Image (spheres, helix red, strand yellow):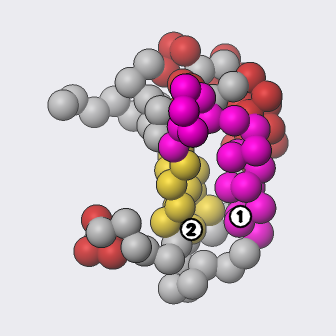
Amino acid sequence: CRQAANRNHPDLYTLQPAGASIKIEQVRGMLRRIPYRSYQGGRKVFLIHQAELMTADASNCLLKTLEEPPGDTVIILISDQPQSLLPTILSRCQQCAFKS
């Protein structure tokens, strides 16, 4: 938990917008890390912050992996505007609402 809170956990990867959007190159970079084993023997967690800012190309690039993620991989899309995500993305996600 401390490693994750300090953003230095080896099995926690974060993706944030580069400027005004999350681009396909960023998603491809994240997807290249998915096949690798976790460093600490558990699960790998990928957080996509402000997921509603993914371009259509970036979202479409992510679809196959969201549909069939490897068993040791968790992908979490964080958004305060989930209605802005593509319907094809939403249909592959389990939504959890958190109150601030």
Quadrant of the snapshot with the C terminus: top left
> Is the C-beta separation of discs 2 and 1 under 8 Å?
yes
Local SS, label 2: strand
Residue drawn at point x = 28 percent, y = 33 percent: 98
Q: Residues within 10 Å of mark 2 (few under 14, many from 20)?
A: many
> In x, y percent, where is residue 39?
57, 84
Residue 25 lies in the magenta-colored region: yes
Residue drawn at point x = 37 percent, y = 66 percent: 7
Please say if 39 is above or below 21. Answer: below
Does residue 86 appear to the left or right of 3 in the view shown? right
Residue drawn at point x = 51 percent, y = 14 percent: 83
Does residue 36 appear to the left or right of 85 in the view shown? right
Q: Is residue 94 visible?
A: no
> In x, y percent, where is residue 99?
21, 29
Mark positioned earlier in the residue sequence (2 or 1): 1
Please say if 82 is above or below 26. Answer: above
Quadrant of the snapshot with the N terminus: bottom left
Local SS, label 1: loop
Residue 5 lies in the magenta-colored region: no
Per the rendering, the mark at residue 44 is 2
Q: Quadrant of residue 58?
A: top right
Please say if 23 is above or below 35. Answer: above
Q: Is residue 57 visible?
A: yes
Residue drawn at point x = 62 percent, y = 35 percent: 22
Specify the amino acid type for callout 1: Ile
> In x, y percent, where is residue 13?
53, 61
Q: Residues within 10 Å of mark 1 (few under 14, many from 20)?
A: many
The count of marks equals 2
Residue at image mark 1 = 34
Q: Residue furthest front?
A: 19
Q: Which residues are magenta?
A: 16-35
Please say if 15 is above or below 34. Answer: above
